[in-house]
C-alpha cells in the first residue's frame, strides 16, 4: 500500500529509483513520482527535480526519460490513494513552499487535518489533498527556525528537524526526506509501516519491501519502529525514538525468491497458480517425513517451540481477506482434526471489540505479506492486553503464518511458520493461499499429535491415512492446474458479460466458496457472493434466475448429498450450475463440471480452490482486464 524508495550514493539515482518502484508497483499504482537532488556548478542550494505522473509507472518513466532527473540522491513513491483522488497533484513527492524540500510517505497521518489547519493559519498554502503534505511544510518551518537560530544547513540539521517533527505526527508512516540545502543527505524514518535499508558499496537504497532491494544488495538493515536514520554516501546514523544512537548488525536476504519474474506466462497470477504444485512439493519435503517402520517419528515435522503449544486450550486466528479464508479452513482443521476450540476474527474488527480473554490461548496472525496493518495492530493489541495480566495462564503466545518471515509480523510474534511460497506479485493471492492452508494442516497435525488422547478430533490411524494422502498432493495439483487451465479458458467467454455469480460450499469448503467469490470480484469486477449452501434458501435464492450462474462445491463427505440438494434448488430457479465436483452420476445435474479428484473431505480445499482461481483468472483475462494490478487494490495493505 504505497511503496517508497530512496537512494544516496555516487551514481545517478533516477534509474535505480525507477527500478525500485517497478519492483514495488504491486503495492499501489494510482500514480508515481520521484525527486532527485542535483548540485549544479557547485552551487548550494542544489536543484530539486521533482517529476510525478498519474497512473502506472510507465507514465512516470516516460516523463523522466523526456525531462531528465539528474542527481546522486533521490526519493520515489508509487501510490495507492488514501487521502485525495489519484491525480497528479496528489502524487508524491510533496514539497514545501520553497520547493527545496521533498517528502515521500507510506502510511496515514491521522491528525493531518488539525496540522493542516494550524499551518494554513500561519499562511502555508497547500497544493494537494493528501495527509502527507503537512510533513514537508512542518520540516521546512522547523529548519527555518533552526537556521534563524544560527545553525548551518547540513544533513545533521535535516535529521534534527525531522526528529523534532515526528512526535507531532499521529498514525503510521514510513517516510524519506531530501533537502536541496543538504544535497549529500537523506533522512528516513518509520513508525508502524515497513522500511528497510539496503547497504551497497558507497551507496544506500531504502525501500518499503525487499523486491526493490534484491537486485541492488543482499545486505539489509530492517528499521525498527520509531527509528530515524541519516544516510550519506559515507555511512548510516541510526537513532531510536528517544533520539539515542543505535548500532545494529545488518542481515542477509536469503534465496533468489525476492526477484519477480513472469517467465513465459501472460500474467504473474497465472504463473503463480501454476507454481502451486511446487509450493506443495516443498511443504511435503520439509514437513512430511517419510514414515519409518516401527519408529514413533512425528507425522509432521514442524519447527515450533513447545512453549507455544503445550497445554493449549484455545486458538484464535486473526486475518484479512484471502488470509482470513485460509484461517477459516484452518479453524475447521484445528477443531475437526485436533479437537481444539478455535475462533476466527477479522483483524480489523478484533481490535475494537476483542473477545474476553481466555487462558492458555494461542493467537495466530495470518498474513502473506506480514505487513497488513489491521492484522499487525490486532496482534499487538492482543499481546499488550495479555501482558497486563499477572496470571501466567493468560500470557501472550503469538504465532505468525506468513510468506515473509522478515516482515513486521516476523518481528512482532514469538514464532513464524514461513510458508516459503516465493514472491507473489499478482495482487490476487493464489499460491500464498495454498501455502497458508498447508501451514494449517501442519499446525493441526502437530496439535493433534501433542494432544494424543483427546476425545475430539481424528484418531491416530485416521491422521496417518490423511498424511499419506497429503503426499500425493503435488502430483494431484500438477494435473489439476494443467487440466483446469484449459477447461476454464474454454469456459470463460460464457461468463464474460455476467453481472452476478453465486458461489456455494458447505463445511470445510464454505471458505473456498468465499475465496472463489473474492477472487472473481477483485480481478474481473463481477459482483459475486459466497454462501454456505444451506443458507441460500433463507434469502439469497431470491437473486437466482437464468442470468445468475451458481458455482457449487460438491465433494464426497459429510455434506455431499446436502450440497447436491442445494444445487438442485438453484437449478429449479433456472440458474446455470457449475459444479466443482468429481465426475459421475451424482453430479450430472450440473451444466458444467470442473472435476476434482476424490480425496478425504478434510483435504479437499487444497484441490477445490484450483478451479476457483483459474475460472476467475480466465474470466478477467477474457475481459481484457489488468489481472495483476486490479483497480483500487494493492498487494500489501499497510493502512488501517
Ligand atoms: C487477496 O487476493 C486479496 N488481495 C486480499 O484480500 C488479501 O488477502 C488481504 O489484503 C490480506 O493480505 P495479507 O495476506 O498480506 O495480510
Image: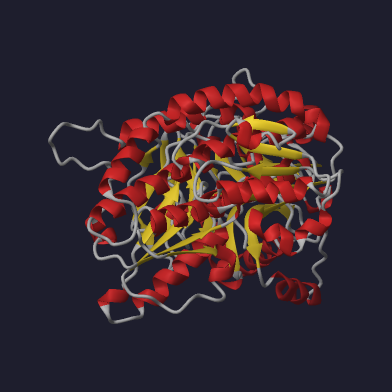
Q: Where residue 103 sits in the image (x, y, percent)?
A: 66, 53
* Residue 229 or residue 616, whichever sits in front: 616
Left or right: where 452 falls relative to 624: left
Image x and y of residue 214, in percent: 49, 32
- Please state the horizontal and vertical placement of residue 236, each as a whole percent of the image: 43, 47
Query: Which one is nearer the viewer's eye here, 181 or 475?
Result: 475
Residue 358 vs residue 8: left or right?
A: left
- How many numbered marks have been drawn onto this rendered protein structure? 0
Q: Quadrant of the C terminus?
A: bottom right
Residue 492, percent across and down?
77, 30
267 relative position to 350: left or right = right
Q: Residue at x 76, y 63 (%)?
A: 539
Front residue of 189 and 38: 189
Identify which residue is drawn at 52% across, 47% down: 369
Left or right, 448 with reference to 59: left
**Residue 458 seen:** yes
Amino acid at each position: 500500500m504505497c511503496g517508497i524508495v530512496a537512494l544516496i550514493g555516487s551514481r545517478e539515482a533516477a534509474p535505480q529509483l525507477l527500478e525500485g518502484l517497478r519492483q514495488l508497483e504491486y503495492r499501489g499504482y494510482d500514480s508515481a513520482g520521484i525527486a532527485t537532488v542535483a548540485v549544479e556548478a557547485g552551487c548550494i542550494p542544489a536543484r530539486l527535480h521533482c517529476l510525478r505522473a498519474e497512473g502506472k509507472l510507465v507514465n512516470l518513466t516516460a516523463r523522466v526519460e523526456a525531462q531528465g532527473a539528474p542527481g546522486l540522491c533521490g526519493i520515489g513513491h508509487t501510490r495507492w490513494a488514501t487521502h485525495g483522488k489519484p491525480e497528479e497533484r496528489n502524487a508524491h513527492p510533496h514539497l514545501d513552499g520553497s520547493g527545496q524540500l521533498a517528502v515521500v510517505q507510506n502510511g496515514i497521518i491521522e491528525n493531518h487535518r488539525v496540522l493542516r489547519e494550524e499551518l494554513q493559519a500561519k499562511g502555508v498554502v497547500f497544493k494537494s489533498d493528501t495527509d502527507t503534505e503537512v510533513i514537508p511544510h512542518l520540516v521546512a518551518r522547523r529548519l527555518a527556525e533552526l537556521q534563524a537560530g544560527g545553525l548551518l544547513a547540513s544533513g545533521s540539521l535535516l535529521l534534527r528537524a525531522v526528529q523534532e517533527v515526528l512526535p507531532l505526527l499521529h498514525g503510521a508512516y514510513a517516510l524519506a526526506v531530501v533537502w536541496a540545502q543538504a544535497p549529500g543527505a537523506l533522512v528516513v524514518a518509520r513508525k508502524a509501516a515497513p522500511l528497510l535499508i539496503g547497504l551497497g558499496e558507497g551507496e544506500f537504497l531504502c525501500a518499503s519491501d525487499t523486491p526493490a532491494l534484491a537486485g541492488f544488495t543482499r545486505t539489509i538493515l530492517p528499521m525498527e519502529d520509531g527509528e530515524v536514520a541519516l544516510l550519506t554516501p559515507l555511512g548510516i546514523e541510526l537513532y531510536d525514538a528517544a533520539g539515542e544512537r543505535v548500532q545494529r548488525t545488518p542481515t542477509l536476504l536469503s534465496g533468489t525468491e525476492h526477484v519477480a519474474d513472469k517467465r513465459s506466462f501472460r500474467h504473474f497470477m497465472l504463473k503463480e497458480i501454476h507454481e502451486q504444485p511446487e509450493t506443495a512439493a516443498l511443504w511435503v519435503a520439509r514437513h512430511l517425513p517419510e514414515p519409518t517402520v516401527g519408529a514413533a517419528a512425528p507425522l509432521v515435522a514442524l519447527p515450533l517451540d513447545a512453549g507455544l503449544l503445550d497445554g493449549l486450550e484455545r486458538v484464535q486466528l486473526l486475518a484479512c481477506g484471502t488470509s482470513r479464508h485460509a484461517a477459516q479452513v484452518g479453524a475447521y482443521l484445528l477443531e475437526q482434526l485436533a479437537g481444539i476450540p478455535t475462533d476466527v476474527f477479522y483483524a480489523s474488527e478484533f481490535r475494537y471489540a476483542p473477545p474476553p480473554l481466555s487462558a492458555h490461548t494461542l493467537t495466530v496472525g495470518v498474513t502473506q505479506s506480514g505487513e497488513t496493518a489491521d492484522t499487525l495492530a490486532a496482534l499487538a493489541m492482543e499481546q499488550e492486553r495479555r501482558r497486563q495480566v499477572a496470571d501466567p495462564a493468560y500470557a501472550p503466545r503469538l504465532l505468525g503464518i506468513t510468506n515473509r518471515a522478515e516482515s513486521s509480523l516476523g518481528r512482532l510474534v514469538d514464532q513464524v511458520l514461513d510458508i516459503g511460497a516465493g514472491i507473489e506479485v499478482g495482487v490476487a493471492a493464489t499460491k500464498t493461499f495454498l501455502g497458508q492452508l498447508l501451514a494449517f494442516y501442519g499446525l493441526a497435525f502437530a496439535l493433534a499429535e501433542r494432544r494424543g488422547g483427546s476425545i475430539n478430533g481424528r484418531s491416530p490411524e485416521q491422521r496417518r491415512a490423511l498424511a499419506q494422502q497429503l503426499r500425493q498432493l503435488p502430483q494431484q495439483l500438477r494435473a489439476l492446474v494443467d487440466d483446469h487451465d484449459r477447461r476454464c479458458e474454454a469456459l470463460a467467454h460464457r461468463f464474460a458479460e455476467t453481472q452476478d455469480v453465486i458461489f456455494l460450499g458447505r463445511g470445510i469448503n464454505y471458505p473456498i466458496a468465499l475465496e472463489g467469490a473474492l477472487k472473481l470480484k477483485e480481478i474481473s469486477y463481477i459482483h459475486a457472493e459466497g454462501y454456505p449452501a444451506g443458507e441460500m434458501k433463507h434469502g439469497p435464492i431470491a437473486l437466482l434466475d437464468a442470468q445468475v450462474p451458481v458455482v457449487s462445491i460438491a465433494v464426497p463427505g459429510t455434506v455431499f448429498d446436502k450440497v447436491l440438494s442445494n444445487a438442485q434448488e438453484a437449478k429449479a430457479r433456472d440458474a446455470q450450475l457449475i459444479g466443482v465436483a468429481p465426475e459421475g452420476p451424482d453430479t450430472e445435474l450440473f451444466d458444467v463440471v470442473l472435476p476434482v479428484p476424490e480425496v478425504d473431505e478434510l483435504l479437499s480445499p487444497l484441490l477445490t480452490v484450483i478451479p476457483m482461481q483459474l475460472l476467475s483468472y480466465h474470466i478477467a483475462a477474457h475481459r481484457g482486464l489488468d489481472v495483476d494490478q486490479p483497480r483500487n487494490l494493492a498487494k500489501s495493505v499497510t493502512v488501517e
